[in-house]
């Protein structure tokens, strides 16, 4: 398997600095980052480490779930996966930490009932490599089968 690579070029301090994150191995894009916009309600065209984690988790989870649906005898017609990542203070170690991650999936699946879909959804949450990497963060899941 290849080793995906990203890099960040940063200038300045935390409060007055900024940077650019480059998805180097693909190379599909370069994205602006800054701490003040990371902590603001409106990102203003910048991304954050938390948004990148959310993107990684939602895509990894969708892949894992589609594989498990197939293993259970179903066919995923569509999966809509959202990942919400929360950042908050780390009272034990200082600074900040990820305080939670919520996965929400809506699926249109042939060949599985609601219970079968829920079983696959739960197993995907546990088995996705990004979920495994985030074991120190509480991950919750809301799954619903549509259609």
Image (tube, helix red, strand yellow):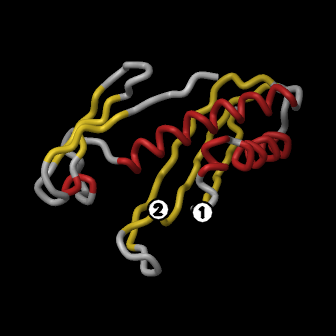
Residue 66: quadrant of the picture: top right
Mark 2 residue element:
strand
Q: Residue 128 or 62: which is nearer the viewer?
A: 128
Circle 2 crowding by C-alpha within 10 Å: few under 14, some 14–19, many from 20: some
Q: Residue 7 or 107: which is nearer the viewer?
A: 7
Residue 22: quadrant of the picture: top left
Q: Residue 113 or 38: which is nearer the viewer?
A: 38
Q: Quadrant of the N terminus?
A: top right
Circle 1 crowding by C-alpha within 10 Å: few under 14, some 14–19, many from 20: few
Residue 86: horizontal and vertical position, in percent?
44, 60
**Mark earlier in primary sequence (1, 2):** 2
In this rendering, position of residue 8 left or right of residue 58: left
**Whether residue 142 is situated above or below residue 96 in the rendered picture:** above
In this rendering, position of residue 3 left or right of residue 87: right
Q: Residue at x 23, y 55 (%)?
A: 35
Q: Which residue is mark 1?
A: 136
Q: Residue at x 47, y 45 (%)?
A: 53
Q: Quadrant of the C terminus?
A: top right
- Disc on res. 146: none
Residue 77: quadrant of the picture: top right
Residue 48: horizontal and vertical position, in percent?
33, 47
Mark 1 residue element:
loop
Q: Residue at x 38, y 73 (%)?
A: 89
Q: Residue at x 78, y 23 (%)?
A: 75
- The mark tally for this picture is 2
**Label 1 vs label 2: CA separation?**
9 Å
- Identity of the residue furthest to the bottom in this view: 91
Marks 1 & 2, CB-CB < 8 Å contact = yes
Q: Residue 14 or 89: which is nearer the viewer?
A: 14
Residue 36: horizontal and vertical position, in percent?
19, 57
Residue 111: horizontal and vertical position, in percent?
85, 27
Q: Which residue is mark 2?
A: 98
């Amino acid at each position: 398997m290849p080793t995906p690579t990203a890099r960040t070029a940063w200038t300045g301090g935390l409060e007055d600095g900024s940077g650019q994150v480059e998805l180097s191995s693909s190379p599909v894009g370069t994205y602006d980052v800054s701490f003040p916009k990371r902590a603001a309600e409106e990102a203003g065209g910048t991304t954050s480490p938390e948004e990148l984690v959310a993107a990684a988790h939602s895509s990894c989870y969708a892949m894992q779930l589609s594989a498990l649906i197939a293993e259970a005898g179903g066919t995923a017609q569509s999966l809509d996966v959202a990942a919400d990542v929360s950042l908050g203070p780390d009272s034990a170690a200082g600074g900040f930490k990820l305080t939670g991650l919520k996965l929400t999936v809506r699926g249109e699946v042939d060949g599985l009932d609601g219970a079968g879909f829920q079983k696959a959804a739960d197993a995907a949450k546990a088995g996705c490599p990004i979920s495994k990497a985030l074991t120190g963060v509480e991950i919750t899941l809301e799954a619903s089968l549509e259609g």
